[in-house]
Amino acid sequence: MERSAITPEQKDILAQVGMAVVVAQAAEQIIRLVMTYVIQGSEPLTLEYLQSLNQKERNKTIGFLLNQLRKRVDLDDSFDNTLCRFLEMRNTLIHNLDEIPGGWSLDNEQGRDLARKFLSEFGRVMNTVVSVFLGLVRSWQEQVGMNDRDIGIPPDPWLADIDAKYKPLVEDIFFATE
């Protein structure tokens, strides 16, 4: 059985898929961080509890964590819709690329265009999710007196941008449950 060579156009799409998977994993880690430390459940934070959580949280799906988030806080409707879109697109990327609307394919330009469009939209959605959750983490850091310098985080223009744009939105996006 002879295998055909992968074209540069196909390599480009596959590289974009790989990058999207890596960034999606980073987004999931940020969501887990928020659910473990920032928007905690009813358990008090003890060393034993944190050690047991590490393994438990790793095994939970991102969908489960987002449902837990909705139980712990009320969300701005627009951001909740963004989270739904993130989960839907993440699951399509991870579990079934064939579900990309319109039918993606590496074998023709139309299919590659659909893949590019999907990956571009997913990148925008993921950027919003990551930025909002990082804004929440940065706000929490400030509330608990966790200084970047004290925990070894060097000055970073990207974090300064998160602080300026997303940290102020936290109270508009996440509400206490009643």
Image: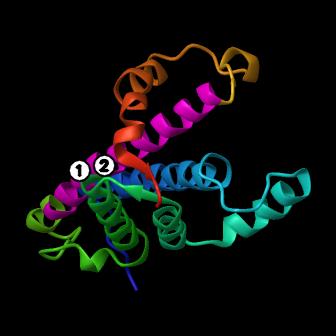
Q: Position of residue 116 (x, y in %)?
A: 20, 55
Q: Residues within 10 Å of mark 2 (few under 14, many from 20)?
A: some
Three-letter amino acid code of the residue under disc 1: Ser
Residue wearing tag 1: 120
Asked if the stretch drawn in magenta spans residue 67, the answer is no
Q: Which mark is residue 177?
A: none
174 up-or-down from 163: above or below: below
Task: Identify the residue at horizontal 19%, vertical 70% (top origin).
Answer: 107
Main secondary structure found in the magenta portion: helix
Decide if residue 68 is on the left or right side of residue 101.
right
* Magenta-highlighted residues: 114-143
Q: Answer few, some or many: residues within 10 Å of disc 1's Cα (few below 14, many 20 plus, some between 14 and 19).
A: some
> Residue 137 falls in which quadrant of the image?
top right
Element at badge 1? helix
Q: In the depicted view, which residue is nearer to us: 120 or 172?
A: 172
Residue at image point 46% right, 61% down: 178
The x and y percentages for residue 120 are 23, 50
